Amino acid sequence: MVALIRRMARAAFVLLLAVTATASCSAQMNNAGSVVAWERGLAESGDPVYQTKIGLRYRSGDGVQKDEIEAAKWFRAAAEHGNANAAVLLASAYWLGQGVQKDSVRSYMWYEVVIARLQADDKVLAAAVRARSEVAKLMTPQQIREAVDLVAAWQPVQASRPQ
């Protein structure tokens, strides 16, 4: 009888641990959802850092359903605001056709915007220079001129929401 009571107590303890772990996971998931909602609110208010973060979440499926089109929209919003990291991510999306139609002119344009027009750290700048060089290898001189003209016409916006 004592052995049966001990087994029942252990089973109850294991069940309690399982319930606690499930509740903890649920709370973490709710916290993750809250974080995503908070970040999305900042992104929607026009904050380019959070627009980039939300874009990365959509690209990877971190806390949201993976959606390359939605990722590209957020990268574009942040890049239009002048965020160099987002501009590199958007240029890459155009180069690879991830969430946008593959377009070497737009890809080159966004890499060139990072290089010539934005404040970027050395690592981002070096990546943009290397990538632009690779894109240029497959472009005609006319396409490069078109991209350079787009860069010359580009102006950052004060705040943007994805369209």
Image (tube, rainbow, N blue to C red):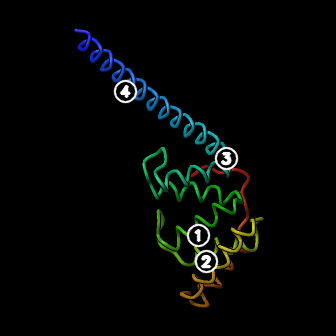
Marks 1 and 4 close (CB-CB < 8 Å): no
Amino acid at circle 2 = Ala
Looking at the image, residue 11 sits to the left or right of residue 63; the answer is left
Residue 13 place in picture, x, y as percent: 36, 19
| Residue visible at 53% across and 59% down in the picture | 72
Residue picked out by circle 1: 91
Mark 4 or 2, closer to the camera: 4
Circle 4 sits in a helix, a strand or a loop, which is it? helix
Residue shown at 76%/70% (left/top)?
117
Q: Which residue is mark 3?
A: 46
**Local SS, label 2:** helix
Evaluate if marks 1 and 2 touch, with contact meaning CB atoms under 8 Å apart: yes
- Quarter holding the N terminus is top left
Q: CA distance from mark 1 to mark 2?
A: 9 Å
- N-terminal of the pair, mark 3 or mark 1, is 3
Residue 18 - label: 4
Identify residue type, mark 3.
Gly
Q: State which quadrant residue 141 falls in.
A: bottom right
Mark toward the start of the polypeptide (4 vs 2): 4
CA separation in Å, label 4 and label 2: 49 Å
Q: Amino acid at mark 1?
A: Ala
Label 3 – label 1 distance at C-alpha: 20 Å
**Nearer the viewer's eye, disc 1 or disc 2?**
2
User: In 3D space, how far apart are the residues under numbered discs 1 and 4 (Cα atoms)?
Assistant: 46 Å
